[in-house]
Image (cartoon, rainbow, N blue to C red):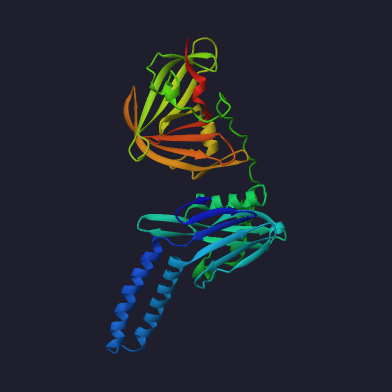
Amino acid sequence: MLKQENLEIERQGNRLNITYRWRTSTAYGLLFFAAIWNGILLLFLFFGAGLYISVHLLIGLLVAYYGLCLFLNRTVISVNSQQLTVSHGPLPSLSRNQVVISREVKQLYLKRSGSVKSGNKTTQLYALKLRARDKREVKLMGGIPDKALGEEVERAIEEYLDIVDVPVEEQFEMPDLGFLKKFIPEEMQREMEEVGREVQSKPIPPTPTPIPAAPASSDHQEHADHLSYDFALCHAPIGAAFQVRDAPYRLTGAEVIEWTDVPDREVSKVLQASPLATGPVRQFYTYPDGNQWVYFEERPLDAEEREMLGFDAADAPPSLRNGDERYHVLSQNRGVLKAGHGERPVEEWIYYSSRATTRFRAMQLSGRQWRVAVQEPVDSSYIEATA
């Protein structure tokens, strides 16, 4: 079962249940505003202000009801082998309950559905839609402020119904021009629509070739407690000799990340090792997990691979797509990177997929510099001191 602040995904026997609560900070703001607004208007009515105030009171009551809907309502999506049902409640709203035969579901996709602005921050909203085999489109959820959350719901339903996720080409829609529309000649409006359709109909680029994982050096068994072994790479000094599955290496570099917002983990380490004979240079990422140190072998990605995954801007992507796999954010933390060049503030994202052992680690240094690596778990019992 997956539980987030407003989202719960649970599989019970032969049924998938998804519950999404509408409650956001907007609900609290609307209810507070409505309480103040309606309270003042009631005072005016009490002192005989007249019907003019009644109109404003009606608006205040509608705002209060909308706030209650956001505060109390939830969307429940239930999926089994026969049908997919969507219900909204407990308060009645403009959102419609839906029932779709499971075998008629062709694809699910997210669509931009507007935005909300709070101060200097603008939040993009999304709607999760279903496309049936008869080309009918059904809205399952709306007003989703987190794209990654919507993608998680989409992925859960697609996996349950065994639907291969493919990009969906949305139909072009002319923007609402309001009163300006009457000043634009009809011929120009038709040209605008034609240009929009041409842009929308451009072919969707093919799915990129998956980025290969880091070299596998274990059979993915459970990571061993270092107290059971004579050698711990995480505590070894620079220059220490060791072997990984009988291949000899020497520790040549180490970076320490001290976390400022991870209460159960103080540090992580990035270790570089060079072969004593022949073989590739290797990089390991390790951190303590209780009495154990968990290891991953990493392969740093080049600029082209980073751009393919979406690390070509200042902000980290909410999710990654590598071949047919979609990776979601497992953790996001801030800390200080300590290495030979001094100390630098860093922010780190770990991306995972429930269907793969491979992970991606992205680290942004000051100056918006990205370091991205693909990881594979390593059993610490295969890392031994050189005899």
Q: Residue furthest left?
A: 47
Q: Is residue 113 above or below residue 360?
A: below
Coordinates of residue 318 in the picture (x, y in percent): 49, 45
Q: Residue furthest front?
A: 228
Does residue 93 appear in the picture of this structure?
Answer: yes
The quadrant holding residue 347 is top left
Does residue 316 appear in the picture of this structure?
Answer: no
Q: Nearer the viewer, residue 192 or 202?
A: 202
Q: Is residue 118 above or below residue 239?
A: below
Q: Nearer the viewer, residue 291 or 82?
A: 291
Q: Residue at x 39, y 60 (%)?
A: 25
- The answer to whether 291 appears left or right of 142 in the picture is left
Q: Residue at x 29, y 78 (%)?
A: 40
Coordinates of residue 349 in the picture (x, y in percent): 44, 39
Coordinates of residue 105 in the picture (x, y in percent): 68, 57
Q: Is residue 116 above or below residue 53?
A: above
Coordinates of residue 379 in the picture (x, y in percent): 52, 26
Count of marks overlaid on the render? 0
Q: Nearer the viewer, residue 223 or 317?
A: 223
Q: Nearer the viewer, residue 2 or 200?
A: 2
